[in-house]
Image (cartoon, rainbow, N blue to C red):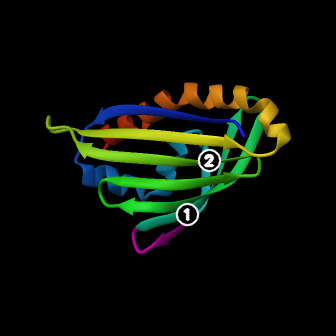
Amino acid sequence: MPSASFSHTVDASGTPEIVWDRLQEVDSWANIGPIDEVWDPTHDGHSLQSYRWSATVGPTKYKGSAKVIESSRPRRMRLALDAREMVGELTTDISANGDGATRITVTLAVESRGMLSTLFFPVVSEAVGNGLPRQVEAFAASLEEE
C-alpha cells in the first residue's frame, strides 16, 4: 500500500514541560497534523490516552481514532491514527534548544488502506504534507499566548 511521511520542526517559547502539558489537552491536537476536529478524549490521570478525530481533505471528511502508543514525559508522544481509509502515526518530539526555547518536531507517517483509498492517496498525502508546517507553526504560536 502507498505510504508517505512528513515532518516539520519549529522553536516555541516555554519549556518542554509546558509543551508537554499542552499536548495532554485534547484540543491541542486539533491543530497538529491533519486533524481539524477532536472529541471524546480519555485520560489516565493527567495523561492523554486516546481521542476521536476528523480531518477534511478536499471534499472528503475522514473520521478516525488516535491512541497514545508511546509517552515519554516531557520528550516524546507518539499516537497511532486509525481511519477506515488510512492508518498512520503522529509523533511529537520535544527538546530544549539551548536558547531558552523549546524545539518541537512533528512527524506524520500515513499509509493507505484498501483499493479505493490507494487511488486517491497521492492527492490526500499531498494535502496533508502541505498543511503540516502551517499547523505545527500555529500550535507553536498558541504557546505564546500562555
Highlighted magenta segment, given as a residue range: 41-46
Residue closest to the eye, 72 or 37:
72
Q: Residue at x 42, y 59 (%)?
A: 24
Question: Does the residue at mark 2 contact the one at mark 1 (Cβ under 8 Å)?
Answer: no
Q: Is residue 49 left or right of residue 71?
A: right
Element type at mark 1: strand
Please give the residue where the numbered disc 2 appears in the rendered image: 37
Q: CA distance from mark 2 to mark 1?
A: 14 Å
Q: Position of residue 76 (x, y in %)?
A: 36, 53
Residue lying at the far bottom of the rendered structure:
45
Residue 17 got which mark? none
Mark 2 crowdedness (10 Å alpha carbons): few <14, some 14-19, many ≥20:
some
Q: Considering the whole magenta stretch, tell me its main secondary structure.
A: strand
Q: How many marks?
A: 2
Quadrant of the frame with the C terminus: top left
Q: Is residue 43 magenta?
A: yes
Amino acid type of the residue tagged 2 in the rendering: Glu
Rendering quarter of residue 106: top left
Please give the residue where the numbered disc 1 appears in the rendered image: 50
In the picture shown, does residue 93 fall above or below 132? below
Q: Position of residue 25 (x, y in %)?
A: 44, 57
Q: Upstream in the sequence, badge 2 or badge 1?
A: 2
